[in-house]
Amino acid sequence: MTRAGDAPGWPVVAVLLAGVVGAFAVITWSEESENRRRRVAGWENRVLDGVLSPLTTRDWHVFPVAFALAGRLDLLVPAAAVGAHVFWLATLAVLRRVLRRVPV
């Protein structure tokens, strides 16, 4: 990417870093509140446990390969920056929704 002149600038890298930190924080909160949030039944727990949590453990090496095969490595970091924010915001919304229904 650097040789081709497609390396992302610092603003894009900063947005990516912020997204990674947000994702780490919300997944940690989800894991720490797992026993509490499971006191209520709901689709939110299925989404958190069955969809969003496994996404944090997958091998993401396929994305650079896919972007490289498409000839668009220049879009990899910006796409990851946007995707990280979409991920943590969606996870936060679902987590807050289920935790609001947990009796105190």
Image (cartoon, grey):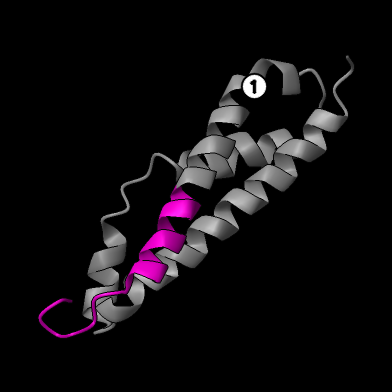
Name the residue carrying label 1.
34
The x, y position of residue 19, in whole percent, is 49, 54
> In x, y percent, where is residue 47?
66, 42
Magenta stretch holds residue 7: yes
Residue 68: tell me if it is visible. Answer: yes
Looking at the rendered structure, the secondary structure element under dot 1 is: helix
Residue appearing at x 55%, y 58% in the figure: 85
Identify the image quadrant of residue 32.
top right
Looking at the rendered structure, the kind of residue marked 1 is: Glu
> Between residues 24 and 55, which one lies in front from this camera angle?
24
Quarter of the image that includes the C terminus: top right
Compared with residue 20, is residue 15 higher up or lower down, i.e. above or below? below
Horizontal relation, residue 98 to residue 5: left or right = right
Image-based side of 60 in relation to 44, left or right: left
Residue pictured at 81% horizontal, 27% vertical: 41
* Residue positioned 89% across, 17% down in the render: 103
Q: Is residue 104 left or right of residue 86?
A: right
Q: How many marks?
A: 1
Is residue 100 positioned above or below 70 on the image?
A: above
Q: Which residues are magenta?
A: 1-20
Residue 96, given in percent of the width and then of the height, sits at 77, 38
- Residue 1: horizontal and vertical position, in percent? 18, 76
Is residue 42 shown to the viewer in this render? no
Considering only vertical position in the picture, is 76 above or below 60? below
Q: Is residue 10 highlighted in magenta? A: yes
Of 28 and 60, the residue lying toward us: 28
At horizontal 35% and vertical 78% (from top left) the residue drawn is: 75
Q: Residues within 10 Å of mark 1 (few under 14, many from 20)?
A: some
Tell which of 1 and 42 is nearer to you.
Answer: 1
> Residue 51 lies in what quarter of the image?
top right
